[in-house]
Structure formats: C-alpha cells, structure tokens
Amino acid sequence: MLTMNEPADRLPGRAALARKVLPYALLSPAVLVTLAIVFFPMIQAAWMSLHDYILWKPKDFTFVGLKNFTAALQDEVFWISLRHTIIWIAVTIPAQLLLGLATALLLNQQFPWRPLARALIIIPWALPSVVIALMWVWIYDANYGILNEFMLRLGLIKASVPWLADPDTALYAIILTLTWQGFPFFAVMILAGLQSIPKSYYEAASLDGAGALRQFWHITLPGISGVLVTAVLLRTIWVANSIDVIYVMTGGGPGYATYTLPLYAFIKARTNLDFGYGSSLAVLFTLMLLGLVIVYLRRAGRSVN
Amino acid sequence: MSKLISAALAVGLLAGTATAYADETVRFWYHFDNADNPMSELVAKFEKENPGIKIEAENVPWNSYYDNLYTSIVAGNAPDAAMVKMFAQPRLVEMGALEPIGERIDAWDGKADLQDNLLNLTKASDGKSYYLPIQYVVLYLYYRQDMLEELGLEVPKTCDEFRDVAMKLTRDTDGDGQPDVYGFGFRGGKGGHDHWGSFVLSRNVDFSAGSLTSDAGVAGTQWVVDLFEKDKVFPPSAPNDGFKEVTGAFKAGKTAMTIHHIGSSNGMVEALGDAVSATPVPECGGGHWTSFGDESTAVFSTAENKDAAWKWISFLSTAGNNTEFNKATGQLPVTKTDSEGWTLHEKRFVDATVQSLPFANLLPNAPETSDFVNTVWPVNMQRALTGEITAEQMNAEIDKLYNP
C-alpha cells in the first residue's frame, strides 16, 4: 500500500495518477453541493431573466433577450427602489458602525457586571427578524405606540405621527429598526479587534504624552481597521439584501415608499409571479452590488495595507 | 455485486410500497385565522368513516397562501385538494392545475342541499365546474350603536349620510386637542379593495375600458381620498392598515365604523357587546355594491387519488360537517340544512348579511384580478391617500391593468 507522505514523482504511473486525483475526489462532494445549491440557481435566475416567464402561464417560456432589462430601466418603480436602496445602505451601515464602535469602546472599559452587559448587547442581533419587525411595528403604532406616547408627553410632537404610514418617514423608521438590530454585530466584531491590541502600545503612548484622542486615532483605529473593513463589507451585503424586516413592517408600502430593489424583485416574482422580470431585477441588483464590493475592496484594502 | 443489486431491489420495493400507502393520503391546504381550529376533529371523523384514507391537513398562513399555492404547483408539489377563492380560479385554470369536478358534483347526494346559485357563481369562464363551495360571507358596515345614540345620529344609508356621520363621530373625547375616535376604519393595505369597491364600484362603474377613468369613477376614488385627507375621518395609519389593525382599532373604540363580514362578528361582540351592530354598506352615487366573500374547495389535477380527495372535500360541504367547519372560520354554511336554525352568530349580523346579498358582487373572473388584489390596488390606493398620485392616476393604473 502506498502512503500519502511519499512524493508523487517517485511512485509508479498509476499510483501517481491516483495521488493527483484523490484531492479532487475528496473535494468533489462539497463542490458538487455548492454548484447545485448556489451556482445552479444563480445561472437559472440569469437564464430566466432573458425570458418571458410568468408562473401561471407555465407553458409560455419565450426567449426575449434583454427585453426585461430595458423594461426595468424604463420602469419608474425600478428607479424609486434603487434610490431607496442607496439611502437604505448609506444610512444604515454608518449608523450601525458608529453605534457599534461606541458600544465596543464602552464595553472595553472595566466596570462591574461587564460580562453581563456584553451578553445583553447581543440580544437584538440574536432575535429573529420577524420578531424585531413586529415589535417595532407596535412601537411605531400611531394609536398605541410607545414612541408617539413618549414624544407627545415630552412635547416633541403635537399629534401622533403614523411613522410607518407616512411616506416621508416610513423608510427611515425601518432604517432605525435595522440599525438597532445590526449594531451588536459591529460591537462584537470591534470588541474582538480592540482586545487584540496590546496594552503596552497605550502605555508607551501615554508615556510619550499622547492624550486619549490621539491614542484612539493612532493606536485604536489602526488596530481595528482590518476588522472594520471586513465587518463593513459583510454588513453591506447583508443589509443590501435584507428584505425580511421591510416585508413584515410595511410590505413595501405605503405605495412604493419602502420598496428596495431586492424587495421589488421579490414582490414581482413571488406575488405577481412574473419570474422573468423579477429575475432581471435581481440580476441587475447583483451586478450593482458586485461593482460596489469590488470598488470597496480595492480602496479599503489599499488603505489598510 | 449480486448483493448490491438485491439491496437496490429491496430499496426499490420498499419505495414502491411507500408510494402505495401515499396513494391513500390526501394532502389538504387550508387557512384559518382561528388558532384553536377544529380541523383535527373533522379529519378524525372522516378517517373513521373512510378507513384507508388518511388526511394530511395543513394550515397555511393567509398572507402567503396563494404565493405558496402557485409556487408549489409549478414545483410539482401541489396539495391534492385545497381551499380556494374565486379570484384565483382563472390563473389556476390557466395553469391546468384544477380537476373538473362537475360530474362528481352532479352524482353527489349533497348537491341538492347546497344553497341556490352558489354553484353557478363558482363556475369557471370555460363553463366547467372546478370549485365546490364551502362557506361564504358578504361584507357589511359595522357601527357603534352606542356612539350613534350618544350623538343622536341615524345609521347612514347613503354615502352623503355616511360622510356626515363619520365626520361627527370623529372627535376628541379627552380634551387633549387631538381626535381619539375616528369615524371610519379604512383598510388601505392588502384586502382593502372591498372598502373602496363599496364607495366606487357602486357608481355604475366597473373594470371595463374607460369606466374607472370616467367622471363617476374618478369621483368615487376622490371621495375616498377626501375622507382621509380633507375630512380626516380615517385614523392616520389608514394607508398601511390591514385586517388586524382595522378590527383591532374598532374593538378598542378607536374607530366608530368599519367594513368587514360576519366572520369577525363574534370577536366584535366579545369586545363590545351590544354596542356593536351592523347594516348594509351605504348606497353611493346612485348604486349599491358590496363584496361577496366566497370560499370553495377544489381537487388538483396532480392529485394521485382524486376519488379520495373528492370524498374529503365533499365531506366538508355536507350538512353537519359544514357547520363544524364554519364554527372554525366564523363564516356562513353553504348547505340549506345547516343554514336553517343557524345560531353561531347573533341575528343582527346574519340579517345584515342577508340584506346585503342582492347587491353582493365578485371581482372580475379574470387573471388580472390577482394582481389587482395583491399589488395594484394597495400600492395605488396608498399612493393616492398619501398624496403621491391623484385619484385619476390611481383609477388609470387599474384601468391599464385590466385593459392594457
């Protein structure tokens, strides 16, 4: 029997071949599964986007080229949704990041019950999105909601505001919910980064007379920059694609006020059963997100290095 | 090698027998809001009467009921039988998903006991019968008897009276300068087309080309928008409100009137007692329109054992069983026997339902109606209510859907 430790070139022909093939054979189950559950649906979506495919007319599957894509670019709702998606990402991510950073800095201090505080802070992240969405629907409720009650008593508003039923506030109300849900992720990641910075750096810096702000700027930030880049990238992709909270809280309403592109694609495909058009929206959005990720990695990667 | 083959054969045989058992299973989909539903009792009774048939009844949440149904059909995993509404029929027929059951109905003992006209109402546009009615409701106006009496108001019979009453009922009861009670709980979210229909489709307007965009059609939608924007008789959350919010606000005394059907009456009485009553929806613009809420069952063309599936659905529409079924849903039975001496609802709600029957209508039996109900109506109504588009633009969007 041959052992795996012998180099391939010393073995006779058949054994050498087996030696070369074996790693691929061992990898193949994982690769096949990934192909089947990730790449095949992706290719299928891209293929569907080039067809007229309405689910309740299953016999009609006509190739239409880029018709769905040109239709999307001329669709008013596409542009409304795109605008909301940009706001959605551009407000949620920085808000989560700043809140997460502040929380992590606080949790990195010495204080009694610190382990308990660290455990509690993870709760919003650990709750299912549907629970969070339903909870915040009640907080925002125009008749019974605690937010209105609170603001009325403080005299901040004169009359109850229907936060989720007013197109001017609905999107931001959901963004606040998502910020609340997602900031623990940043807090935990950043906290891990903070703890990997050696204490001696701070001691040396304070000996040299650096204040808290300068220590933060020259030691803490560079120390956690690698973590930040990764966390921001992951959250951007998750937040961009996340539709569950919107779907439960408003279903996209009132009107198109809380439509984002993934939600629009979902509603087109699943509710209107127009899988051709829905797929083309999804493909368009994937390409945009891919572009964003590439630009981000190039710029952020460079500055970290 | 021979061992391997015999093992494979054995597995194949086992799989074969498993399918043979599965043949006797009927997978049934339904949707009940009621959490403690007695479906299991009906299933047990049926299985006792029909040994050899097993019913797998699955309660699918209403909000995604049809999304799940259509996708399961395309994925080749449709149930054998399911609860279905008329608005879905054109699509299901187009998909070839339904089994015609006209002959089975004709040969069925229970046919004569079905309420008149129900089988005609549920016939498909191709003249065949795919649906077996199981329950029905008619939408009417709920109102707070005590609030009307307190203010010395009459129950509104027309839209003008309705608007007047709604404005008077909208009031600040605790003196903090903002209304605590609103005249009408309008459903601006999914399902609210029934409310809108009573105020708009009553004006001799329908979904044919140019009808909704006519002066009468636009005036109807404008009237609804004005109730919200100018008269402010709907709660501010109206654009997003669905069934839960509308009935919740009415039960809590936040609204003084709303439109729904007898299915919610027991809950209303539980919350409000004698203070709640019902009457047909107001007559608007010279006509009268309300929504007929239908519910049937159907056998799917992919069902492996159609006889068993038919036995099960016809069992549910048979006198006695139909009462049990409607106990769970709170709607009205389709059999004459069960309708006589019906005691599960208070009489005033049954009366309002019966009085509303002469002008109860279904939405057009066309494939577009699904999109109208699910997206086109709610999105455009919400946009109109929040002032993003005009009433005319809203009606034009609906007209465009039905008459491209």
Image (cartoon, coloured by chain):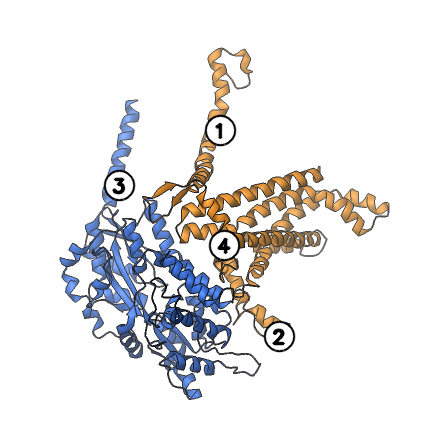
Chain colours: A orange, B blue
Mark linked to residue A153: 2
Residue designated by label 1: A27
Give the label, 3 or 1, closer to the camera: 1
Classify mark 2: residues with Cα within 10 Å, few (<14), some (14-19) or many (20+). few
Q: Chain of mark 3?
A: B
Residue marked by disc 3: B18
Mark 1 or mark 4: which comes first in sequence?
1
Does A23 sit above or below residue A193? above
* Closer to us: B2 or A209: A209
Camera-near label (4 vs 3) is 4
Vertical arrangement, residue A145 with respect to residue B172, above or below: above
Residue B70 spot, x, y in % from top left: 34, 51
The disc placed on residue A77 is 4
Where residue B170 sits in the image (x, y, percent)?
48, 80
Q: Secondary structure at mark 2?
A: helix
First reached walking from the N terminus: tag 4 or tag 2: 4
Amino acid identity at mark 3:
Ala
